[in-house]
Amino acid sequence: MCGIAGLIALRDTARIAAPGALARQMADTLVLRGPDGSGAWEDADAGVGLGHRRLSIVDLGPGGAQPMLSATGRYVISFNGEIYNFHELRSELSARGLTFRSSSDTEVMLAAISEWGLAAAVDRFIGMFAFALYDRQTRTLSLVRDRLGVKPLYWAVFNGTLLFGSTLRALMAHPAFDRQIDPEAADALLRLSYIPAPATIFRGVFKLPPATILTARAGEEPSLARYWALDAIIAREAAAINPAEAADRLDHLLRDAIAKRMIADVPLGAFLSGGVDSSTVVALMQAQSTRPVKTFTIGFDDPAFNEAVHAQAVARHLGTDHTEIILEAKTALDLVTRIPDWFDEPFADSSQLPAYLVSEATRRHVTVALSGDGGDELFGGSPTYRALAAVCRRAALLPHGLRRLGGRFMTEVPERLWRLTSRDPRIGEKARRLAQALSAADADAAASAIDAVGFAEPLVPDARRTLRPARLAPSGLHDLISRMQCNDTGSYLPDDILTKVDRCSMAVSLEAREPLLDHRVVEYVWSLPSSLRRGEPRPKELLRQVLRRYVPDTLIDRPKRGFSVPLDAWLRGPLKPWADDLLSERSLAENGLVDVARIRRLWQRHQDDIERNGTGLWNVLMLQAWTRRWMHG
């Protein structure tokens, strides 16, 4: 795992004397992503500079140093990620007469590109990657991001120069970078807890979408092309197969995906929550390991949110070397001031706190950790999917006007009354989201409405609310849950879940690997009928069938729980002084983005326990903390 950065002059007047030195300066802001080494390369005549920071995982010696030139000298690459099938590709290329001087996957990538061309080589890569490839012959820069968006890549054009980097801080290190906040992006953050691609918090700065190649050369506008399309795969006719055969095939694919991700020249472990996804990953790791797998889990001192006991039970059964970390309110207070350093673009999924803490503890023991991320989107495990589908089926029997009236009535019910109906500490927030779904015109609009986990009301006066997550689901995908899965895989997964994992792990120089997102697994699972793919009537039944081969039902037969933190209580307790400062009238007015009076009212209602707005307020706090660090710091 690494950090990459660089630039290319798109106009003759944009060329500078030492682009390599500037690329190195940009890359050096990514030192936590690559603490083990650095490098830079330049073609000053073409105005090109590539920078690299290295976290050594495979081939720890100088043979894996980057930027790296191909054997022919035609290509130069700066690469972040891992190609898990590089051994197979190397064998095939060796049979064609190519020779190798190192044992790194980067050299194999360059050889594959030289032999087959960029598009054909990328099509054969199994892995997570974001890389910049410069073709010295055609003077073309290509930026490439992996199929599911595991690894990040940002780009922008300022004053005739295209800049790129693993995260925004690398671009911000360039003197031409213009820090103009986009109100649409700020508004999206307050609604969604993240900023959907391709937008970023800054005007004119973009995330490269997953499965995309950007091509740039002097005298032309950059162009983008997709090389893999999830919606096209989903649109294919489902294959007929019996459940036992489907489970056998999935078991085989997962074993291979996990085995490939266990290849490393450094210590390796896994995150274990005790849920179906991470338990399956750990079970298959342990089945292929000759020693106890090192596993790590996070718990809370609040029993309403603590699920560490389930991870302990799975770890005992599998015989892993297990470590448990408890996140206490005091620890959270120590961490919150550091969040803007992990996320140089504002990000507000509050599970960032336990994600960082478990990454930090894991890094003390290993350098690589496998995770179960992606299972909910792939196998339809999110409780929201089935709950919304059930609501929409019933609501469809009523006229839209009556549904809107019902939604309006729900928003008028005092939150304290909702709390009398449930022990769920987030019942008020959930009731507000349900009201938004009921008020929607149809099922897809309802699914879009509940994406807003923060405040539904506009809090950024200058925003027109046009920025929303990409909707990828093909029109021929008839059931709502499948459409939600598809859309989440293309937006919420890369822009929220994988962003959180990448930034929190990279903040401690830990490489996280996601075997459930091996594109072969994704393609296979989406080739199955929906009832088999996600399980009817029980969610994730196909994945459970695989897990039952290693873990008894008693350890996995429990309701799905989200990876959430007790925000409401923390914001009225230990985090209150920190939040009071960021949500003061002076601090809110300083950034000039938000409606100060409305946010002050919502903060007071939260403190008075009239209306619990933990998620929405956390979104505002993350915007405020980021602004203080990156705009006024």
Image (cartoon, grey):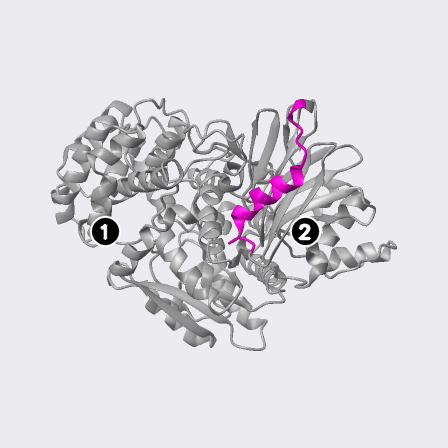
Q: How many residues crowd around disc 1 within 10 Å: few (fewer than 14), some, or many (20 or more)?
A: some
Read off the magenta span: 13-34
Tag shown at residue 104: none
Q: Nearer the viewer, residue 20 or 260?
A: 20
Does the magenta-highlighted stretch encompass residue 89?
A: no
Q: How many residues crowd around disc 2 within 10 Å: few (fewer than 14), some, or many (20 or more)?
A: many
Callout 1, which amino acid?
Answer: Leu
Quadrant holding the N terminus: bottom right
Q: Which residue is mark 1?
A: 575
Q: Residue at x 37, y 69 (%)?
A: 324
Residue 320 picture location, percent across and down:
47, 74
Judged left or right of residue 491, residue 337 is: left
Which residue reaches farthest right?
Answer: 97
Q: Which residue is mark 2?
A: 66
Q: Nearer the viewer, residue 605 or 141?
A: 141
Callout 2, which amino acid?
Answer: Gln
Q: Nearer the viewer, residue 321 or 100?
A: 100
Quadrant holding the C terminus: top left
Q: Work out how far the residue at label 1 is from the one at label 2, CA to CA, in angstroms.
A: 43 Å
